[in-house]
Image (tube, rainbow, N blue to C red):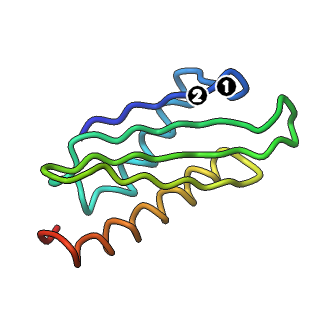
Amino acid sequence: MKIQVNTDSLVDGNQGRIDSVSASVTRGMDRFKDQITRIEVHLSADKPSAMAEQQCALEVRIENRQPITVTHKAPSSDLAVKGAIEKMKSALVRSNGRNKPF
């Protein structure tokens, strides 16, 4: 499972932050790791301010299926990542009923 983290110009994209986000996504998606080939994480902010709302978009690519995308907005990027992971887990469980099992 490959994870790629992208940030816009309003989000700090230093290596420590990227490693932290990658680790969170890896832990959160561990249950599905055998079917997931790639996860793209997109972190963005709505304005250049410490009070800006943060957004995390996750796109998961699964073998022989269309990609699944979710987004979550929160006051901090950590909460946005956590919320997006929870939404993705729910989306993957729902898609399981329509496709082959995980």
- x and y percent of residue 20 in the render? 51, 38
Task: Say whether residue 12 is left or right of residue 67.
Answer: right
- As displayed, is residue 25 above or below residue 2? below
Question: How far apart are the alpha carbons under marks 1 and 2?
Answer: 7 Å
Amino acid type shown at disc 2: Thr
- x and y percent of residue 79 in the render? 65, 54
Amino acid type shown at disc 1: Asp
Task: Say whether residue 37 is left or right of residue 51.
Answer: left
- As displayed, is residue 48 above or below residue 55? above
Image-quadrant location for residue 10? top right
Which mark is drawn over residue 67? none
Mark 2 falls on what kind of element? strand
Residue plotted at (83% across, 28% down): 48
Report the front residue among 53 and 82: 53
Residue plotted at (27% across, 40% down): 38
Q: Give the residue number, with chain letter if any, for mark 2.
A: 7
Q: Give the residue number, with chain letter if any, for mark 1.
A: 12
Task: Say whether residue 87 is left or right of residue 14.
Answer: left
Report the front residue among 72 and 79: 72
Which tag, 1 or 2, sits closer to the chain's start?
Answer: 2
- Outermost bottom residue: 97
Report the front residue among 20 and 82: 82
Residue plotted at (17% across, 67% down): 102
- x and y percent of residue 39 in the render? 34, 41
Mark 1 falls on what kind of element? loop
- x and y percent of residue 93 in the render? 31, 73
Residue plotted at (34% across, 56% down): 29
| Labels 1 and 2 touching (C-beta < 8 A) | yes
